[in-house]
Amino acid sequence: SSKPSIELENQQFPTDSWTNLPPHIASALPRKLHLQPSHPIAITRKLIESRFPAATYKPYNDLSPIVSVHQNFDSLGFPLEHPGRSKTDTYYVNASTVLRTHTSAHQADTFRAQESDGFLISADVYRRDAIDRSHYPVFHQMEGARMWSRDEHGGNVAAAVWADFEKLPKHDMVIEDPNPTIHPERNPLQDPHTAEEAEAIAAHLKRSLENVVVEVFGQAKKAAIAAGEAKGDEEPLRVRWIEAYFPFTSPSWELEVFWQGDWLELLGCGVVQQHLPTNAGVPSKLGWAFGVGLERVAMLLFGIPDIRLFWSHDPRFLEQFSEGTINRFVPFSKYPPCFKDIAFWLKSSSSAAGGGVGAGFHENDMMECVRGVAGDLVEDVRLVDEFTHPKTGRKSVCFRINYRSLERTLTNEEINKLQGDVGAAVVEKLGVELR
Ligand code: PHE
């Protein structure tokens, strides 16, 4: 961050006090896993794309991850105080430029371009986050949208949307969907829409996405049976719609599936807030949008147990997959874990109450130090202890780092060196004092 500019995708960007993009994150930009035909992320993308006719849903697969704060937040109606905008959550190239945190960053521009009635945007997205087997600071999303024009339908699109709904494939999956489409407090209708329009759009949205789930789980089950993992007589798949909130849709939902004992969120969606098409110069259009996490779906489809594997260069991983084929991942080995604790005193200014662990100290900053030193050699990092000194009021925290390579057994010397370097990094970057 002491450099006056950084180069990303052959372009120079000036840096400033907002810049927080470390080299180990910038190095992910050229990977483009969703475009490598035999990579599980690309295979998953194509499987989902196959459920949406390309004539209606135009695919966009190479939009740049470097977007403006306006595209990522303002254009979608994120309030200025939204936590997603903070430096602890988002990678800033500089004060006005970020690495997109979601594919919704391209909604406004794509509505404005008006190249089709719908679209599918697949891309890498970036978020500062915890470290564990299902969280990685870079992942992939697919954004989908479908719009109808009131100009073409006499001022009300409900009948046209229902007609399109009738053309969608039907399925016989049981879906839990206990809430009304519209709830005045929890999930309100937008002023510019009639209840008939919102009901029709919601029905088309839900059916379209349920058809994706039917396809994905059908394929996952076939692959499991082929691998001898399942006999095909287990409990039926449980899928549910729950109410959600996004600044750019209303009403909004999330789709969850019951997987390995827990409800797993696959996607967010809803009826597009009318300010988006209006500001994009297409005020007579209305419809739905969704954003689905591709790693989540790929982990279910291929049985991939750790999100770091997607980034592996190891041929023992990459050579297991081929274009157009869904098969179960065969783990090459589970190498031994090694747990190391690191404890430190927070800066006295950060001992004040509030703001999570301590005001001025954010767990994501700790995560970033660990990733900067040890990269993919860390499986997870957990806060295991917090302590406030009774006399001085100083606060101390202890994190447990689980070092484990996906590719080999780490040596003691190597781990001790990494642990020492993590200690030096937190002292330098976070100004804390090791205990
Ligand atoms: N962008 C949202 C997210 O990343 C998902 C979403 C997309 C929700 C489109 C609604 C509509 O969580």
Image (cartoon, rainbow, N blue to C red):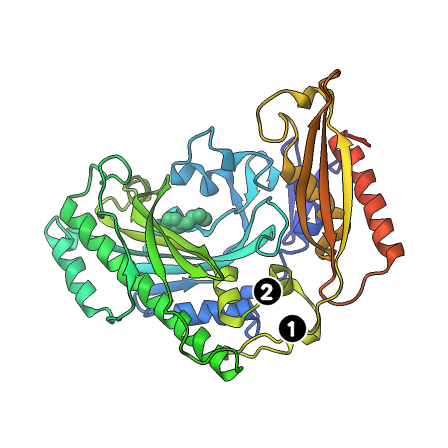
Looking at the image, is 171 positioned above or below residue 405? below
Q: As drawn, is 425 to the left or to the right of 119?
A: right
Q: Secondary structure at mark 2?
A: loop
Residue 257, image quadrant: bottom left
- Residue at left offset 29%, top offset 63%: 208
Which residue is disc 1 drawn over? Answer: 331
State if disc 1 and disc 2 touch (CB < 8 Å).
yes
Amino acid tagged 1 = Pro
Residue 420 makes an appearance in the image: yes
User: Would you name the residue on which mark 2 appears?
Assistant: 305
> Is 227 positioned to the left or the right of 221 in the image?
right
Q: Earlier in the sequence, mark 2 or mark 1?
A: 2
Distance between the alpha carbons at the discs numbered 2 and 1: 9 Å
The N terminus - image quarter:
top right
The image quadrant where one finds the C terminus is top right
Relative depth, front residue between 235 and 362: 235
Q: Amino acid at mark 2?
A: Pro
305 shown above or below 218: above
Q: Secondary structure at mark 1?
A: loop
Q: In x, y percent, where is residue 242?
A: 33, 49
